[in-house]
Amino acid sequence: MKYVDEYRDGKLARAVAATIAAEADPSRHYAFMEFCGGHTHAISRYGLEDLLPANVKMIHGPGCPVCVLPIGRIDEAIELAKNPRVTLLTYADLMRVPGSKGTSLIKAKAAGADIRMVYSTLDAVRIAEENPDREVVFFAIGFETTTPPTAMAVKMARKKGLTNFTCFVNHVLTPSAIRAILEAPETGGLPPVKIQGFLGPSHVSAVIGLEPYDVFVEKYGQRIVVSGFEPLDVMQSILMLVRQINEGRSAVENQYTRAVTREGNVAAKAMVDEVFDLRDAFEWRGLGSIPNSALKLRDGWAEFDAEKRFAVERIEASDNPACECGTILIGAKEPADCRLFGTVCTPETPMGSCMVSSEGACAAHWTYGRFRAKAKREAAERKAS
């Protein structure tokens, strides 16, 4: 496929890997976090870690919006859906995320709640328009990539005069999460090695641009390379980070020039700013409560706020104590380090959100990484014998 296959050329990927190996100082250790779950899956799917030298380590980050959502918000959505007047709409990967006490949206649906999967916010508006006798609540979730479509849906609902449409808003912000990772105390369960650079998310950056990352260079001396999702994008971005370290530089660089500009999508940002405001704080799985890290509807759009219309009460719920999803999200552990992984926790019977979402690190390792890990172990055993 044109403009896809070109970025999946194995020969070119191995050539970039050889350049990384040649330029990576053998006396140094390089540790980079891929923030976005899309990058985690690309790295796992194409075996990119196997191409890197041993002293270049990739660390999984919290860039999976379904994964970082705290269990309490799932429980709150389930309580909303139990209202016999409510039709709850959500994206498919939220349906199987475990809530507390073994609950989930799909189990609530099986028990009789009117919960439906949608592909877009336009579907949500259409369903509200077609069902004027129902209170239609859209479970809005995602980073800056999916926030503009929610803003558009709210504006469209007002234009259409829909009084039965609201949003349960759970949109979170990438820069706030990066800041929380950089400012967390060393005792906070963060990765055992210091992060020396980030692969910046591509789709998010197509919306917000490069400017929001400048603070991480100016205040923290960090390095960020905004990267595309294809294997050659990722390999080139890693090389760019290695070169920054070798040259003693800290900068925001844009590898994904075919989609990302410095100013981002100006129209989308203006629409989001018109409809949304910052929350004082929001709870993230693995990172705790982070100030100014999520969005809520502005007062001028309060009639579309499900939390206000239905007086949603906060539910505090703890993760399964045996599940390591929180520590995996901040790169402190690998999926295989969790004792539930591959035993009681599989895609068919997920115990944590990291195994459910298509962007989750556990799902990526289950689908791709576990086979390479097994092959490595068997090769090491054969060599030892």
Image: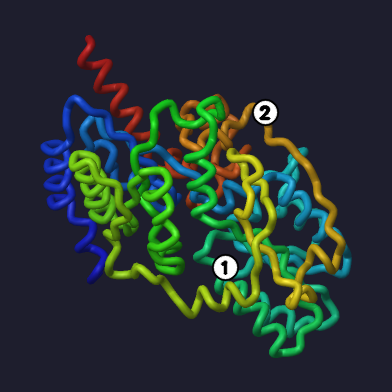
The residues tagged by marks 1 and 2 sit, at their Cα atoms, a distance apart of: 32 Å
Residue 302: image location, x then y, percent: 77, 73
Residue mark closest to the camera, 1 vs 2: 1
| Picture residue at 23% right of the left edge, 54% below the top | 232
Residue 361 screen position, x and y as percent: 47, 42
Position of the N terminus, as image quadrant, is: bottom left
Decide if residue 380 is on the left or right side of residue 40: left
Q: Taking 70 as reference, is 303 left or right? A: right
**Rendered view: 187 above or below 276:** above
Q: Quadrant of the C terminus?
A: top left
On the rendered structure, is 254 left or right of 110? left
Residue positioned 28% across, 34% down in the render: 30
The residue that label 1 is drawn on is 147
Which amino acid lies under the numbered mark 1 shown in the image of this protein? Thr
Q: Amino acid at mark 2?
A: Pro
Determine which of the numbered discs, if any, sits on residue 131 in the image: none
Mark 1 secondary-structure assignment: helix
Judging depth in this view, the residue of 349 and 190 nearest the camera is 190
Residue 332 image point, x, y percent: 48, 31
Give the residue at mark 2: 321
